[in-house]
């Protein structure tokens, strides 16, 4: 249970100055930080404003109370007309949730979307129903879940300009209740320790006949591979700067720390158990992941190891989601341009949606590469670069989603993943046809072998009979010659 929330003082001051300079009456955005089940403290690293909607409107606005009969009666009893009642907040929950989904992909290990913030006057905030606020927080939690899905607390930070002050509440997702908590500021970002690693993996996933009949899609098989990788990481041993981590201690050496994971041999068998007769194909999921994690002050080192493992798994899932989103956008575009028929033909080309029995040729699906982008001094975020994109696209996306003020230098953007992550499969039909042709070819080969062996036997017997006859004739000739040459001589009288 979170009892105290500590925010970075520099980022809090910067966010407050930005809000006052804009002079807007209301704003909603995301809270970036870290919450742990094992700790009663929460960390807030920054506040990220939600950008305008596709229509150009704000994600949060004010709504004046309607002057109904009930309002008039209340106004007359309190001595205030209904027009003077403070306006309440209206939040575009779907848009804020989508912003949270996009931002969560760009955060490295140890950082999450931990809630929302609201910029409004004290009167407006109190006039807004707690149910409205809880609903917005729930939408963000569903769009950007934690690795620990059972942790059901998120933050609501209210930045008030009348009067000028900050307050923080903890929202319980199960009960939708809001309770106040202590809010402090301190040096956070400067005290974070960075952990990094490059994790190489290769997972072989057999395609069984049962899976084919069950119409498992390509995406389903990739998700299974990611789940298997997550299980492998659970039992992996960590080496930090060449030393095996055996206990939950605090580290004081300078960051970044280099981490290596050692997965026990055969600790977890990724492939399914099936006989050779059932396997009709094979999917190879392989590559190298560049992972990062940040450890807060006075946090144990095992927390960094856990966050680093989570970053590896979440990075793969984010890349799969990006491919899926792009394919769905292409299908939607084709429906708008060419009608339903054009959409169906393009949907068949979306490899992640294909059922395995529809894959006619060997194919390879490449995942987007992870690009490391500087955020603040010594702190990084990430984005994902597809084959059709450039570093300029990454910079524009970071500035839009993370509200980064200054320009991003191309030379500061790092492309660390040299080995590309890919999913390769052999065609189901090629494998099946090859097995059938192998059986036919084997039978033909066996038949030809038997015929050749039979012919060879006949030839060998014929040769033996011929040699026997020659030997008999030669023996008879030699015996006759010996009788004539060495027999008794007859004398005439």
Image: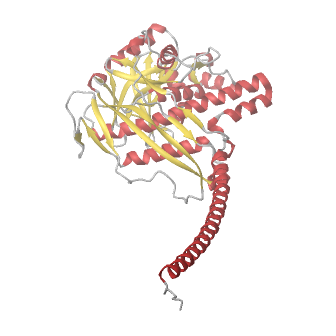
In this rendering, position of residue 459 left or right of residue 367: right
How many marks can you see? 0
Displayed quadrant of residue 304: top left
Spot the residue most to the left. 252
Residue visible at 43% across and 43% down in the picture: 148
User: Dividing the image into 4 quarters, which one contains the N terminus?
Assistant: top left
Instruction: Name the foreground residue: 331 vs 490.
Output: 490
Residue 60 visible in image: yes
Q: Give the answer, above or below, for where 150 lies relative to 487.
A: above
The location of residue 220, given as percent across then percent down, is 59, 44
Q: Nearer the viewer, residue 144 or 38?
A: 144
Q: Residue at x 51, y 42 (%)?
A: 284
Q: Is residue 290 above or below residue 232?
A: above
Q: How is the image coloured?
A: secondary structure
- Closer-to-camera residue (195/210): 210
At 27% from the left edge and 40% from the top edge, which residue is drawn?
239
Look at the picture and state if 242 lies above or below 93: below
Q: Is residue 85 visible?
A: no
Residue 163 shown left or right of residue 452 in the figure: left
Residue 150 position, x and y percent, is: 45, 45
Q: Position of residue 266 (x, y in %)?
A: 39, 54
Q: Position of residue 263 (x, y in %)?
A: 35, 47
Q: Residue furthest front?
A: 493
| In-image side of 183 versus 392 (left or right) | left
């Amino acid at each position: 249970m979170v009892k105290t929330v500590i925010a970075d003082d520099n980022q809090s001051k910067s966010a407050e100055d930005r809000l006052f300079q804009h002079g807007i009456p209301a704003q909603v955005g995301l809270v970036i930080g870290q919450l742990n089940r094992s700790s009663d403290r929460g960390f807030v690293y920054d506040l990220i404003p939600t950008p305008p909607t596709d229509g150009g409107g704000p994600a949060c606005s004010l709504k004046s109370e309607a002057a109904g009969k009930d309002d008039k009666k209340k106004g007359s009893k309190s001595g205030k007309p209904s027009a003077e009642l403070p306006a309440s907040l209206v939040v575009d929950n779907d848009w804020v949730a989508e912003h949270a989904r996009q931002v969560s992909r760009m955060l490295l290990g140890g950082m999450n979307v931990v809630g929302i913030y609201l910029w409004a006057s004290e009167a407006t905030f109190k006039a807004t129903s707690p149910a409205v606020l809880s609903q917005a927080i729930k939408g963000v939690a569903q769009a950007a879940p934690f690795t620990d899905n059972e942790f059901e607390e998120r933050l609501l930070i209210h930045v008030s300009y009348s009067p000028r002050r900050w307050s923080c509440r903890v929202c319980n997702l199960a009960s939708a209740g809001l309770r106040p908590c202590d809010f402090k500021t301190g040096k956070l970002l400067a005290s974070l320790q960075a952990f990094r690693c490059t994790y190489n993996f290769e997972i072989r996933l057999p395609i069984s006949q049962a899976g084919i009949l069950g119409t498992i899609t390509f995406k389903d098989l990739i998700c299974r591979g990611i789940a298997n990788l997550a299980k492998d990481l659970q039992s992996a041993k960590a080496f930090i700067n060449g030393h095996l981590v055996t206990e939950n201690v605090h580290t004081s050496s300078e960051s970044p720390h280099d981490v290596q994971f050692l997965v026990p041999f055969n600790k977890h068998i990724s492939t399914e158990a099936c006989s050779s007769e059932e396997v009709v194909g094979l999917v190879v999921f392989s590559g190298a992941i560049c992972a990062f994690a940040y450890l807060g002050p006075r946090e144990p080192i095992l927390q960094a190891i856990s966050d680093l493992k989570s970053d590896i798994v979440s990075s793969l899932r984010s890349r799969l989601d990006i491919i899926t989103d792009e394919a769905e956008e292409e299908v939607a575009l084709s429906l708008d341009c060419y009608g339903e028929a054009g959409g169906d033909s393009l949907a068949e080309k979306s490899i992640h949606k294909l059922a395995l029995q529809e894959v006619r040729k060997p194919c390879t699906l490449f995942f987007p590469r992870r690009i490391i982008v500087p955020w603040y001094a010594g702190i990084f975020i990430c984005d994902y670069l597809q084959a059709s994109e450039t570093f300029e696209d990454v910079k524009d996306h970071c500035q839009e989603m993370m509200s980064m003020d200054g320009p991003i230098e191309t030379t500061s953007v790092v492309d660390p993943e040299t080995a590309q992550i890919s999913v390769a499969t052999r065609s189901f039909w090629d494998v099946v046809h090859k097995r059938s042709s192998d059986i036919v070819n084997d039978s033909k080969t066996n038949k030809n072998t038997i015929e050749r062996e039979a012919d060879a036997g006949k030839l060998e017997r014929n040769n033996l009979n011929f040699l026997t006859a020659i030997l008999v004739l030669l023996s008879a000739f030699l015996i006759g010659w010996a009788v004539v040459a060495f027999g008794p001589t007859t004398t005439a009288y």
